[in-house]
Amino acid sequence: MGTSYHVAPLDESKLADVQALERQLGRVVVALEPDRTPAALSEDDLARLREAEARLGIVLVAYEAS
């Protein structure tokens, strides 16, 4: 299942926050929004997702089934 993202529109306040984070991290940060709705996970489900991320060495994002 492919998920597409688009650049998140940032008002001046949010842009300033992201730029401050970039300075703190010394990295470029890109603000993206998914084109689908992320799933609302229970604490247990979130823990399972995080465990899988750690085990697999990847980032996982859960979305509501359409």
Image (cartoon, rainbow, N blue to C red):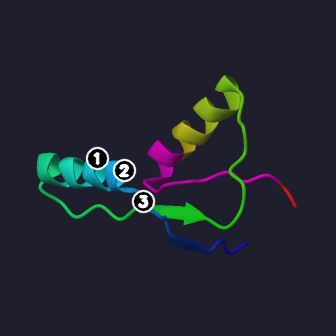
Identify which residue is drawn at 56% across, 54% down: 60
* Measured Cα–Cα span from mark 1 to mark 2: 5 Å
Alpha carbon separation for disc pair 3 and 2: 5 Å
In the rendered image, which residue does mark 3 sit on? Answer: 10
| For residue 45, above or below residue 5 | above
Instruction: List the single residue furthest toward the front.
Output: 12
The label shown at residue 14 is 2
Residue at image coords 18%, 60%: 27
Q: Amino acid at mark 1?
A: Asp
Query: For the residue labelled by badge 3, is the local secondary structure a helix, a strand or a loop?
Result: loop
Q: Secondary structure at mark 1?
A: helix
Residue 10 at x, y = what percent? 42, 59
Position of 24 relative to 6 (above/below): above
For the residues bearing labels 1 and 2, Cβ distance under 8 angstroms:
yes
Amino acid type, label 2: Lys
- Residues tagged 1 and 3 counted as in contact (Cβ below 8 A): no
User: Residue under circle 1?
Assistant: 17
Where residue 47 appears, as percent x and y from the top left, is: 59, 30
Amino acid beneath label 3: Leu
Q: Which residues are magenta?
A: 53-64
Q: Quadrant of residue 49?
A: top right
Of residue 38 and residue 61, the one placed in the foreground of this image is 38
Label 1, label 3: how many angstroms apart (C-alpha)?
10 Å
Q: Residue at x 22, y 48 (%)?
A: 21
Looking at the image, do the residues carrying marks 3 and 2 touch, with CB atoms under 8 Å apart? yes
- Depth check: give the residue in front, 46 or 10: 10
Name the residue at 55% across, 62% down.
33
The first of marks 1 and 3 along the sequence is: 3
> How many residues crowd mark 1 within 10 Å: few (<14), some (14–19), many (20+)?
few
Is 7 rendered above or below residue 55?
below
Secondary element type, mark 2: helix
Location of residue 62 with respect to 27 vertically, above or below: above
